[in-house]
Image (cartoon, grey):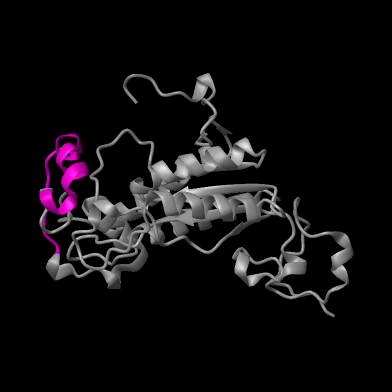
Amino acid sequence: MPADPQRDDSPRRGTRDPDEHALDAHPLDDAVRLVDRTWPTVGAPLVLVPLGATEQHGPHLPLDVDATIAVTIADTLAARVRDSGDDAVVAPAIAYGSSGEHQGFAGTMSIGTAALQFLLVELGRSASTWAPRLVFVNAHGGNLEALIAAVRVLRSEGRDAAWLPCVPEDGGSHDAHAGYDETSMLARLRAPAIRVERIEPGATAPIGELLPRLRTEGVRAVSPNGVLGDPRGASSAAGERLLAAIAEAAWRRLTGEPTTDGLLVAHPAPRGEQGGADD
């Protein structure tokens, strides 16, 4: 069979067993999407699992914002891992999370903390029978309690499981939900999904001031339209910059070390690369 000039046939560390190359090559045997491979061609890759939610994001954004962002960052990480010569795949996104604080709005579908923790533990146990490493890429803050608990269980069982958040480490000020940041990122990723004519500010007080009531009464009690921030002025260019900052922070974490709770943290930058007080 003639070689496909568009196919990357260079060997990847952690890929399939050489004995399995008796199979005829197929362009999807080395696919970045886990579900595009077949069981003989899965190999032993790093598995990135995007973790999002299905919940309201104001009157102007779709319900799958968090899952969209998680998949985007997972895709970027997988590409960088593969560029380095190792194998990595992106598993199907977990689009249901713990979103009880948004339950006052139609469209929100939350499975709660206990169910999410159970789901993550069982998925991790299953994946670890063939994958040497599993990393959850989380884009919804409400998932943290379940995620931390699940990864702690997996690690206590001797499995190489970890997680990282989809947040930048740029020292800037960022709004909490369906505001300028998320609207800008969706403008970059899926602009046609934004209902531009419905963009309006929500609760703009600092999140620290909103949290006590938000935790006891839900988002609707502090923001009738579901927005925490002000999405006016959001742009694709701002979204591109923010996604790049998130991806870079995630990469530094992925190449760092896990804490006892499995949170990946970046290695400290070499002294010569650390910014000073004016940076």
Q: Which residues are magenta?
A: 199-221
Q: Nearer the viewer, residue 104 or 181?
A: 104
Q: Decide whether residue 215 is among the magenta residues.
A: yes
Q: Is residue 175 left or right of residue 260?
A: left
In the displayed orientation, state which residue is furthest to the bottom: 1
Q: Quadrant of residue 237?
A: bottom left
Dividing the image into 4 quarters, which one contains the N terminus?
Answer: bottom right
Q: Residue at x 60, y 38 (%)?
A: 155
Q: Is residue 42 left or right of residue 118?
A: right
Q: Nearer the viewer, residue 85 or 261?
A: 261
Q: Residue at x 51, y 44 (%)?
A: 150
Dividing the image into 4 quarters, which one contains the C terminus?
Answer: top left
Q: Is residue 160 left or right of residue 104?
A: right
Number of dots carrying numbers: 0
Asked if residue 228 can be seen in this view, the reply is no
Asked if residue 113 can be seen in this view, the reply is yes
Q: Nearer the viewer, residue 37 or 215?
A: 215
Q: Residue at x 28, y 71 (%)?
A: 193
Q: Nearer the viewer, residue 162 or 276?
A: 162
Q: Position of residue 254 (x, y in %)?
A: 55, 41
Q: Position of residue 68 (x, y in %)?
A: 40, 61
In this view, 29 is above or below 268: below
Q: Position of residue 227 (x, y in %)?
A: 17, 54
- Magenta stretch mostly in which secondary structure? helix
Q: Decide whether residue 190 is among the magenta residues.
A: no
Q: Position of residue 13 (x, y in %)?
A: 76, 50
Q: Residue at x 34, y 46 (%)?
A: 141
